[in-house]
Amino acid sequence: MASETAQPGFWSRVQRASVERLHIRLESLLVLVALSAVMAVLSPYFLSLSNFLNILLATSTIGVLAIAATFVIGSGGLDLSLGSVMGLSGVAGAFVAVNLGWWSPLAVLACILAGGIAGYINGQLVTRAFVPAFIVTLGMLGLARGLALVISQGRAIYGLPPEIVYIGQGRPFGVPMPVILLVLTAIVAHCLLAYTRFGRHTLALGDSEGAARAAGIRVEHHRRIIYTLSGALAGLAGLLFTARVNAGDPTAGINYELTAITAAIIGGTNLFGGRASILGTMIGALIMGVLQNGLTLLAVQSYYQQMAIGAVLILAVFIDQYQVRKESRV
Amino acid sequence: MTLLVLNGIRKSFGAVDVLHGVDLSVEAGEVIGLVGDNGAGKSTLMKTITGIYRADSGSIQLDGKDILPLDPGQRRQLGIEMIYQDLSLAKQQDVAANIFLGREPVKKLFGLFPWFVDKAEMDRQAARMIERLGAHLPSINRSVGSFSGGQQQTVAIARALTFNPKLVIMDEPTAALAVREVQSVLDLIRRLRSEGIAVILISHRLNDVLAVTDRIVVLRHGRAEANLVTARTNMNEVVGRIVGGGDTSAAAAHEQRG
């Protein structure tokens, strides 16, 4: 064997350990800390407890979507329909609760179910019809948004029952409910992705479909489950959003897939699959949350925020690919 | 008893006849080199052994049992393992993840949740497997893609060994390797033989084949053209059998240098 070249430096060893043991890219953590420091200097309100909870609250919807994006991208797929499916799910839940007047838990179920069905259709089309995921989910982006507008007849559905509003606005122990639900979802998702056979097969599948197939993993079946899971999570995000704003808004979640995918990529998910972690994604989602919150506190127009998110996505993928190329040259 | 016996294997794809009645036998713990020009039918023959292709006629017996009707999964359970040239590794996952892909050991977390992968057990067994091969890897927790070609080959062989194979078919294992790594892969093949595992080595690198095999089977136009005992043959004869007569000294000399 070749003699080992110079010992890797301290920094690269710390990096490697953090990736291997904690499934976190250190760079993203540093970006989060640096960004928070800058915002704290620029705005006196940034470091208050209420603002901290604001950031978490604003991150909760994006965070759930980013978890969905992490599973799909980690498996070598792509889900561009996240934002639209979230909007559709919120409308579906509100329609069941308000227009049909059904029992609130059924409305909650309707949100998850609407998302899950949309995701299931995505999965079926990707694995059976051999249409690329990019096209399938782009089509679903249009389909789900259109259906949301049809169901709601283009107007937001108001008058949700208090039990559902509590999911969005309740504050047990002073912590907003959406934040609690995000944390619970993230814990379950982290265990699923990092410690179970399902999660390991997901990453192996994104790494090399051929290797996964050769190892006896039912590749198509696995992909269908992942797209369904992604849709169901978008449904949960739709529920959180609808409950928080107390309305089934058919235009909810427009462009959210952009932010969610960005959060997942910043968190260390390989755009082409095979590497992903929920902890990383949560850091990525927080970075997006802090960025949006900070820009709002600094009274930057929301148009510019949209530009910032787009730029961050391209930058994150650029840095990731740069590192991959650097490593492969060794 | 002879481990594997092929008799009169025929296979055609539409109008194209690829195998015209191939006979082949492999003893337990024997290393067979399978050589032949491109299009001679090497890959097709191997795929009829692993069960990916079903032979049109002929018989295949493993330990005296007819395995012709069995599918690839069943044949693998009986001990036929194939390592493809691309190795089928998940490059961003670590050694243990690759060795146990699809068969990860699980444990119960807090005695409740039964689906948790037992990473410690996986690492332990993977390390033992690598040690059994007498190989050295930089770290068992590093992604396989960061390894050299020979080290990746080691991981692929270690994975094949977890199925307790009787026969390992290796497709061009030394084709893409650095010179010094070729030796360590040849050592791995010798290690398999010493454990009583038979190996069929498909290779264009005749030097490697001559160095490590017990017998060399030359495939030509879909037939087993020659069955040579490695100790009693040489480069000239092998090359002559591959190209089928004519003046082969120039080609043989070229291979010798290579």
Image (cartoon, rainbow, N blue to C red):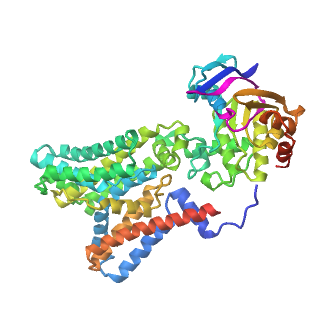
Q: Does the magenta-highlighted stretch encompass residue B42?
A: yes
Q: Position of residue A37 (x, y in %)?
A: 40, 78
Q: Position of residue A200 (x, y in %)?
A: 50, 46
In the image, taking residue B231 as reference, residue A240 lies left or right, namely left
In magenta, the rendered stretch is: B14-43
Most distant residue in the right direction: B232
Tally the numbered discs: 0
Q: Quadrant of residue A172?
A: bottom left
In the image, taking residue A243 as reference, residue A39 lies left or right, namely right
Q: Which residue is at the front of the view, B151 or A96? A: B151
In the image, taking residue B182 as reference, residue A158 lies left or right, namely left
Question: Does residue A92 sit above or below B195 in this rendering?
Answer: below
Q: Position of residue B238 (x, y in %)?
A: 82, 35
Question: Does residue A97 sit above or below A240 in this rendering?
Answer: above
In the image, taking residue A176 as reference, residue B75 lies left or right, namely right
Q: Quadrant of the N terminus of chain B?
A: top right
Q: Position of residue A297 (x, y in %)?
A: 28, 77
* Residue B18 appears in the picture as rendered: yes
Residue drawn at point x = 63 percent, y = 44 percent: B87
Question: Does residue A227 sit above or below B73 in this rendering?
Answer: below
